[in-house]
């Protein structure tokens, strides 16, 4: 049995290769699904069914993934590998028809589909036939034995960024999340990762996914009313003393007039799995409520790569995880050269899937599971990755910092996986029963806890506040010091 494969195989002459793949059309049911083949030979020993939404609403993603597989085939030049393409049309029904055609044409492995609903639709058929599936879904709800995904999962992203921040000394985490399945998934992963890294999740704020106005939820999340009332009380006291002619109070009042709040929030990092205008709006609103970096470090997920953030002063210095960039430039540059457009990060996963299929085709083993789930993992176009028997995966991810001159890798992805890597265990973890619940905003507390923890936490674990009286006093002292305000008589 093959123990380990190196999947990062470059074509030395890149575009000008002397041999080119052969594309043919046909199939048993070409009227109901697009069927075509791509190969470098005619040995027909290892056939792979590639199920993609080549038409329909997700057609542009399917076409991009298909182009990526073609680049991989050109680079790999494996005469033993045959790719058979089938159009799922982006629907469960289309996926079922596609997988039936693929299996009728002797596919030994399925690459795709993209959408979780399509993966769910084909799983009973592939499982019954013992055919492995390497999908691109980012939902872990469809994963099981022999149904894997290369898609970036929430757990690994949250684990990577929160663990890194914890190792940099950040200890109190807040979450700003959409009130949907993605938000709950992030919350679940965050509380598990926090427990692993001795981090406290102090606050979770949920917002409606279609909102563009974060003012109300962030006013509550940042305790703006409490912090501003504290400042106003201090100003009132200073005004009273200044009215009596106290010069020190006059100077302190003048200095305080430019500030709206007094005291820090009870978190030193906040995770926001959002992108585009919503992300920019949310972070700007934090600033409006006097929550700024570097006192609070803004963290993101890989979705941040889809947003140009370098001109946003409030986001400079923030961190997010991304698939390893050590080799991905090769793929992006070649894709752009051949097809005249830059690829989405998603497309590179299709390249890795074909590289994995090529490695599998070299094995004489009938049972592919031990090879697919090799704990050492594989080297792909995005760095290291590995698949687990329950269908989950793990990628070696960079940590990227947002900088004015361009996003920069500040912590490179690991070059190999540890057998005891904690990131692979998140899905099996449970939160300790003594874990103190976070304060919840924007959602019913009991409902939120039930969704995140699977039950409502005991009453003694329900917090009223996270800063102790002494910590709050120290926060106020530091706030005054930062504002260069000296209170007369103190």
Image (cartoon, helix red, strand yellow):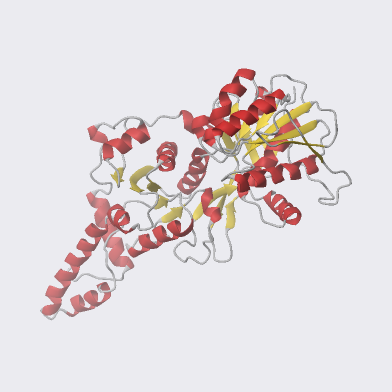
Between 378 and 124, the residue placed more toward the observer is: 124
Between 182 and 115, the residue placed more toward the observer is: 115
| Residue at the spot 58% in from the left edge and 66% down from the top edge | 405
Residue that sits furthest to the right in the current view: 18
| Residue at the spot 17% in from the left edge and 72% down from the top edge | 238
Q: Is residue 5 visible?
A: no
| Residue at the spot 36% in from the left edge and 60% down from the top edge | 286
In the image, taking residue 295 as reference, residue 148 lies left or right, namely: right
The percent coordinates of residue 285 (x first, y second) are 36, 61
The percent coordinates of residue 377 (x first, y second) are 65, 33
* Quarter of the image where the N terminus is located: top right
In the image, taking residue 351 as reference, residue 11 lies left or right, namely: right
Residue that sits furthest to the front in the current view: 31
Q: Quadrant of residue 410?
A: bottom right
Q: Quadrant of residue 151?
A: top right
Number of numbered discs on residues? 0
Q: Quadrant of residue 200?
A: top left
In the image, taking residue 128 as reference, residue 106 lies left or right, namely: right
Q: Is residue 72 visible?
A: yes
The percent coordinates of residue 437 (x first, y second) are 31, 38
In the displayed structure, would residue 301 be above or below residue 390?
A: below
In the displayed structure, would residue 218 be above or below residue 108?
A: below
Residue that sits furthest to the left in the current view: 244
| Residue at the spot 50% in from the left edge and 46% down from the top edge | 161
* Quarter of the image where the C terminus is located: bottom left
The percent coordinates of residue 157 (x first, y second) are 51, 43
């Amino acid at each position: 049995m093959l123990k380990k494969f190196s999947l990062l195989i470059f074509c030395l002459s890149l575009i000008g290769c002397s041999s080119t793949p052969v594309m043919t059309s046909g199939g048993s049911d070409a009227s109901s699904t697009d069927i075509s083949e791509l190969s470098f030979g005619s040995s027909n020993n290892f056939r792979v069914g590639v199920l993609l939404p080549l038409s329909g609403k997700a057609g542009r993603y399917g076409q991009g993934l298909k182009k990526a597989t073609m680049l991989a085939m050109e680079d790999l030049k494996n005469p033993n590998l045959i790719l058979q393409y089938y159009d799922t049309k982006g629907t469960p029904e289309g996926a079922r028809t596609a997988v039936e055609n693929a299996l009728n044409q002797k596919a030994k492995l399925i690459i795709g589909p993209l959408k979780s609903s399509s993966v769910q639709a084909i799983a009973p058929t592939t499982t019954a036939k013992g055919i492995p599936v390497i999908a691109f879904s980012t939902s872990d709800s469809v994963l099981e034995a022999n149904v894997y995904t290369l898609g970036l999962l929430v757990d690994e992203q949250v684990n990577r960024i929160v663990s890194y921040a914890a190792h940099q000394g950040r200890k109190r985490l807040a979450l700003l999340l959409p009130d949907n399945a993605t938000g709950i998934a992030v919350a679940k992963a965050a509380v598990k990762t926090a427990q692993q890294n001795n981090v406290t999740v102090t606050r979770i704020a949920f917002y409606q996914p279609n909102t563009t106005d974060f003012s109300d939820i962030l006013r509550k999340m940042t305790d703006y009313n409490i912090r501003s009332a504290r400042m106003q009380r201090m100003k009132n006291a200073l005004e009273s003393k200044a009215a009596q002619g106290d010069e020190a109070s006059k100077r302190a009042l003048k200095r305080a007039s430019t500030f709206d709040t007094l005291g820090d929030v009870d978190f030193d990092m906040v995770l926001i799995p959002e992108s585009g205008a919503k992300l920019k709006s949310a972070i700007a609103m934090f600033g409006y409520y006097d929550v700024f970096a570097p006192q609070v470090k803004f963290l993101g997920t890989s979705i941040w790569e889809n947003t140009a953030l370098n001109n946003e002063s409030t986001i400079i210095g923030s961190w997010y995880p991304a698939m390893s960039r050590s080799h991905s430039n090769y793929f992006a540059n070649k894709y752009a050269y051949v097809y005249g457009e830059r690829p989405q990060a998603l497309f590179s996963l299709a390249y890795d899937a074909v590289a994995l299929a090529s490695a599998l085709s070299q094995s004489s083993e009938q049972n592919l599971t031990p090879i697919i789930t090799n704990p050492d993992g594989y080297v792909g176009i995005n760095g290291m990755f590995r698949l687990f028997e329950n269908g989950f995966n793990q990628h070696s991810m960079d940590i990227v910092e947002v900088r004015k001159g361009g996003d920069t890798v500040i912590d490179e992805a690991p070059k190999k996986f540890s057998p005891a890597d904690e990131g692979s265990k998140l899905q099996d973890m449970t939160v300790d029963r003594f874990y103190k619940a976070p304060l919840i905003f924007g959602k019913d507390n009991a409902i939120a806890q039930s969704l995140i923890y699977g039950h409502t936490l005991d009453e003694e674990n329900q917090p009223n506040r996270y800063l102790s009286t002494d910590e709050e006093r120290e926060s106020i002292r530091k706030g005054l010091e930062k504002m260069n305000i000296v209170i007369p008589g103190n």
